[in-house]
Image (cartoon, rainbow, N blue to C red):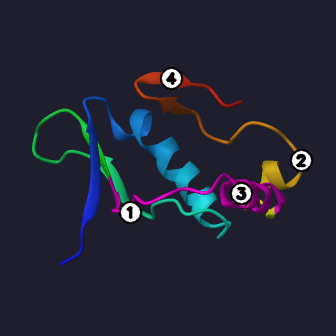
């Protein structure tokens, strides 16, 4: 009876969803802001090109609070990062990702 959110792409998972999954997991692990838990990502196995990512489905709606958003963002930026380079105060991210279909190098 669970609901999931699935995204798919024509590109391989390593190009499209690996960086997104690792980034979301890094945010999720801070326990400061609500992001979907990534359950799985991978390439299609049915002989077709493409890939997918499966996440928990979040119920979104209602009124938002700018104050609560600000508090959550402050908590996020004060959290101890799980990524070694970030914990050392370095910028970037250890893996490239995409913004939509546009490659986003993070080095």
> Closer to the observer: label 1 or label 4?
1
Magenta range is 54-78
Q: Is residue 58 rendered magenta in the image? A: yes
Query: Mark 3 packing: few (<14 Cα in 10 Å), some, or many (20+)?
Result: few
Give the x, y percent position of residue 52: 28, 46
CA distance separating discs 2 and 3:
27 Å
> Closer to the observer: label 2 or label 1?
1
Give the x, y percent position of residue 53: 33, 50
Of helix, strand and loop, which one carries label 2? loop
Residue 67's disc is 3
Residue 89's disc is 2
Which residue sits at x=61%, y=39%?
Answer: 95
Provide the residue designation for mark 1: 58
Instruction: Name which quarter of the figure residue 93 lies in.
Output: top right
Query: Mark 4 packing: few (<14 Cα in 10 Å), some, or many (20+)?
Result: few
Asked if marks 4 and 3 touch (Cβ < 8 Å), the reply is no
């Amino acid at each position: 009876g669970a609901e999931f959110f699935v995204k798919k792409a024509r590109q391989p998972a390593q190009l499209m969803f690996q960086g997104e999954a690792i980034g979301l997991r890094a945010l999720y692990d801070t326990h400061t802001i609500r992001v979907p838990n990534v359950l799985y990502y991978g390439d299609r196995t049915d002989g077709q090109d493409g890939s997918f990512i499966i996440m928990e489905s979040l119920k979104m709606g209602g009124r938002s609070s700018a104050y609560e958003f600000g508090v959550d963002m402050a908590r996020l930026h004060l959290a101890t990062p799980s990524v070694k380079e970030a914990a050392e105060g370095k910028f970037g991210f250890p893996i490239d990702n995409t913004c939509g279909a546009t490659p986003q190098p993070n080095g």
